[in-house]
Image (spheres, rainbow, N blue to C red):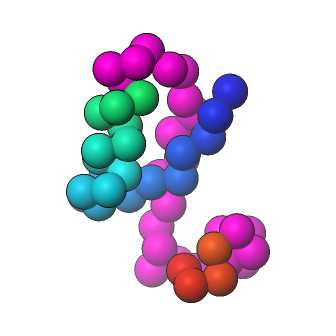
Amino acid sequence: MLTLFHHPLCPHSRYVRLILGEYGIDVRLVEERFWERREEFLLLNPAG
């Protein structure tokens, strides 16, 4: 299963969620609060 780290108000992640829904692809959604700057997320995306 795919995992999408997203922020609900981000237009880019909203678009990805829309497309995944249109294709019927199951995805695990993980809301990422970028202002918390979690170490695990920064390892995936150093730019935050």
* Quadrant of the image containing the C terminus: bottom right
- Residue toward you, 46 or 23: 23
x, y (%) of residue 27?
A: 55, 29
* Quadrant of the image containing the N terminus: top right
Q: How many numbered marks, from 0 up?
A: 0
x, y (%) of residue 13?
A: 36, 51
Q: Is residue 9 left or right of residue 29?
A: left
Could you tell me if residue 38 is visible in this image? no
Residue at point 29% right, 46% down? 14
**For residue 42, what is the image quadrant?**
bottom right
Q: Magenta includes 23?
A: yes
Q: Which residues are magenta?
A: 21-44
Q: Is residue 18 left or right of residue 33?
A: left
In the image, residue 15 sits, relative to residue 41, either above or below, namely above
x, y (%) of residue 29?
A: 51, 39
x, y (%) of residue 32?
A: 50, 60
The furthest residue to the top: 24
- Residue toward you, 42 or 37: 42
Could you tell me if residue 13 is visible in this image? yes
Residue at point 63% right, 74% down? 45
In the image, residue 23 sits, relative to residue 12, either above or below, namely above
Residue at point 65% right, 82% down? 46
Residue at point 36% right, 23% down? 21
